[in-house]
Image (cartoon, helix red, strand yellow):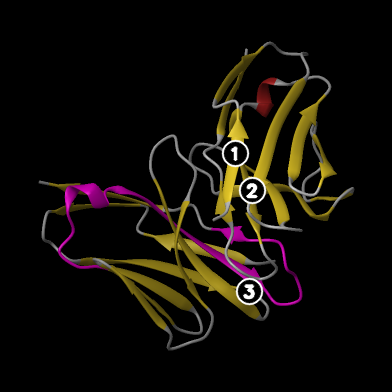
C-alpha cells in the first residue's frame, strides 16, 4: 500500500532563518507531488506541483521554493523565512487524474 | 478561474440528526470532484471521488452526490465521531495536477 511521510510535524523558526520540509512517498512510482499551505479561515492553497524528477511548477510567487531530487521525494525550502510564511504545510501525491492523498502536515510558526 | 464554494461554513447537529453539506463549483471541464475529511491538526483524509453528474458514492453514514453545478455530502444519523471539517475540491480538464479547494464546512455533532 502507498504511504506518505512528512516531517517535522511542528516547527518554530525565527524570521530570516532557512527552511527545509521533506516529504517522501512509498509504494508508488512516478507520482504527481504537491505542496499546499492552509491558513486559518482559508482553503488549501497550492504552492508547487511536480510531475517528475526535477520538474517543478509554481502556482504562487513567494518566498518559497521546491525541489524533487528523487522520484518520491519532494522538498519545500526557503532561504529566509518571513512572518507571513507561518501556516500549515501539506504534502500530497496522486496518480494522474485520480484523488490526492495527503501527509499529516507541518505546523510552521515563524517568530 | 476555478471556484469552489462550500456552505454552510459551520454546522452543528445533534447526534442522529441528518443533514447535508453543499459544494458549488465553477470549473472548465470537470475531471473529478473530491470530498475530504480533515480533523484538527491533521492532513485531509480522502473520502470520495465523483466524475459525472448523477453519480453517487456511499461510505457508512456518508453519501456524496453530484450535479453539473454542485455536490452534496449527505450525513445520515451522524455520530460525535463524524465531527470534522469537510473539504470539497475540483480538478479541471486538461490538467493532471491541480485540485482547487473550498474553505470547508466545520461539522460538530453533539451527543
Q: Mark 1 points at which residue?
A: A5
Which residue is located at x 62 percent, y 78 percent?
A: B30
In which quadrant will I find the N terminus of chain A? Answer: bottom right
Residue that badge 3 annotates: B27
Quarter of the rendering occupied by the C terminus of chain A: top right
User: How many labels, in total?
Assistant: 3
Magenta stretch: give its range: B75-101
Which chain is indicated by disc 2? A
In which chain is the residue bearing label 3?
B
Residue A45, above or below A32: above
Q: Which of B31 and A74 is in front in this view?
A: A74
User: Label 2, on which residue?
Assistant: A26
Specify whether disc 2 shares its chain with disc 1.
yes
Marks 2 & 1, CB-CB < 8 Å contact: yes
Query: B108 or A102, which is in the foreground?
Result: A102
Identify the residue at horizontal 45%, vertical 84% (top origin). Answer: B67
Foreground: B90 or A8?
Answer: A8
Amino acid at each position: 500500500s502507498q504511504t506518505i511521510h512528512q516531517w517535522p510535524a511542528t516547527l518554530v523558526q525565527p524570521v530570516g532563518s532557512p527552511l527545509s520540509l521533506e516529504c517522501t512517498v512509498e509504494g508508488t512510482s512516478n507520482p504527481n507531488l504537491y505542496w499546499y499551505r492552509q491558513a486559518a479561515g482559508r482553503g488549501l492553497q497550492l504552492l508547487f506541483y511536480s510531475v517528475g524528477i526535477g520538474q517543478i511548477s509554481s502556482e504562487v510567487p513567494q518566498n518559497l521554493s521546491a525541489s524533487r531530487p528523487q522520484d518520491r521525494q519532494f522538498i519545500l525550502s526557503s532561504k529566509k523565512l518571513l512572518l507571513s510564511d507561518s501556516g500549515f504545510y501539506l504534502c500530497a501525491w496522486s496518480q494522474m487524474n485520480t484523488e490526492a492523498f495527503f501527509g499529516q502536515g507541518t505546523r510552521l510558526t515563524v517568530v | 478561474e476555478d471556484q469552489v464554494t462550500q456552505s454552510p461554513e459551520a454546522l452543528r447537529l445533534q447526534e442522529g440528526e441528518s443533514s447535508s453539506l453543499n459544494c458549488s463549483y465553477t470549473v472548465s471541464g470537470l475531471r473529478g470532484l473530491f470530498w475530504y475529511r480533515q480533523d484538527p491538526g491533521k492532513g485531509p483524509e480522502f473520502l470520495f471521488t465523483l466524475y459525472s453528474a448523477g453519480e453517487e458514492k456511499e461510505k457508512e453514514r456518508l453519501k456524496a452526490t453530484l450535479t453539473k453545478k454542485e455536490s452534496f455530502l449527505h450525513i445520515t444519523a451522524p455520530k460525535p465521531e463524524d465531527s470534522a471539517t469537510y473539504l470539497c475540491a475540483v480538478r479541471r480538464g486538461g490538467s493532471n495536477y491541480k485540485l482547487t479547494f473550498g474553505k470547508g464546512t466545520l461539522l460538530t455533532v453533539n451527543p
